[in-house]
Image (tube, rainbow, N blue to C red):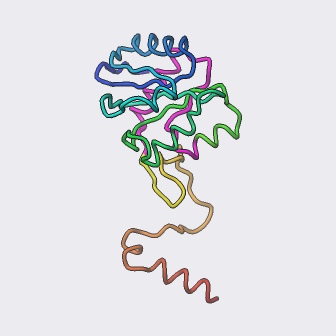
Amino acid sequence: MPAYNLRRLSVLVVERHHLMRRLMKDVIQALGINSIELCSSHELLETDTTIFKPDIIFVDWSAGCDGLDLLQRVRSNAAEFDRFIPVVMVTAYTGFKQVCAARDAGVTEFLAKPITATAIYRRLSAMIENPRDFIESVDFFGPDRRRREIEPAGPERRATEIEKHRGVVWRRQQEAAAS
C-alpha cells in the first residue's frame, strides 16, 4: 500500500458514542490528519457547518445515529456540505440489505465495525486511487456504484452524447412503442 501524505485533509467524524469518536480521532491523527471535527448527529444539527468544511465525512449508522439520513441530506443538498463530498459509512450493520441501502443513498465507502487503522487507511487510499464519477438521475445522486467494467451481454443500449442531443433516443423509444 502506498504511503500518502494526508496532513492537508480535514475530516468530520459523526459518531453516536463519545469513546468511539475519540478512538476514530486518535486513529485518524495517527495517519497524519490533524484537522478533525467530532460530533454526534444531534450536535451536528445544532452546529454551524459553514465554519468547518471537511474533505471527508465518516458517519456512524447505528440505532442512535442515523448516518443514512445524514448521507441522504448531504447528497440531496439539504445539508450545508458539498454534495460531492466523500462519505464513509462506519457501521456494524453489514448485512446485504444495509450495504445496499447505504450504496443506494450515495455512500462513497463502507467501513465495518470494529474499525482498525489499516481499514481506515485502506478506505482513504481507495478514494485517492480510484475516484468515482458522480451520477445524477431522477432517484439517485452519488458516486458511480459500479466498481468494475463488465461488458453488456447484448448490443449497446446507451446513447452517445450526439444521439442524445439530436433526439435519436426519443425517436427510438417512439418506434419501439409503435411496434
Q: Nearer the viewer, residue 97 or 20?
A: 20
Does 49 appear above or below 7?
below
State how many labels appear.
Answer: 0
x, y percent for residue 116:
55, 15
Give the quarter of the image for residue 10: top left
- Does the magenta-highlighted stretch encompass residue 124? yes
Q: Residue, x 43% and y 49% (percent of image)?
A: 134
Q: Nearer the viewer, residue 45 or 1?
A: 45
Does 100 appear above or below 52?
below
Does 3 appear above or below 71?
above
Residue 90 lies left or right of residue 4; in this view the side is: right
x, y percent for residue 124:
43, 27
Q: Residue, x 52% and y 28% (percent of image)?
A: 42
Give the quarter of the image for residue 92: top right
Give the quarter of the image for residue 167: bottom left
Q: Quadrant of the C terminus?
A: bottom right
Does 22 appear above or below 2?
above
- Does the magenta-highlighted stretch encompass residue 84? no
Residue 94 lies left or right of residue 51; in this view the side is: right
The magenta stretch spans which residues?
103-132
Q: Residue, x 54% and y 69% (percent of image)?
A: 157
Q: Quadrant of the N terminus?
A: top left
Q: Nearer the viewer, residue 26 or 129?
A: 26
x, y percent for residue 138:
51, 61
Q: Nearer the viewer, residue 112 or 155?
A: 112
Q: Residue, x 50% and y 67% (percent of image)?
A: 158
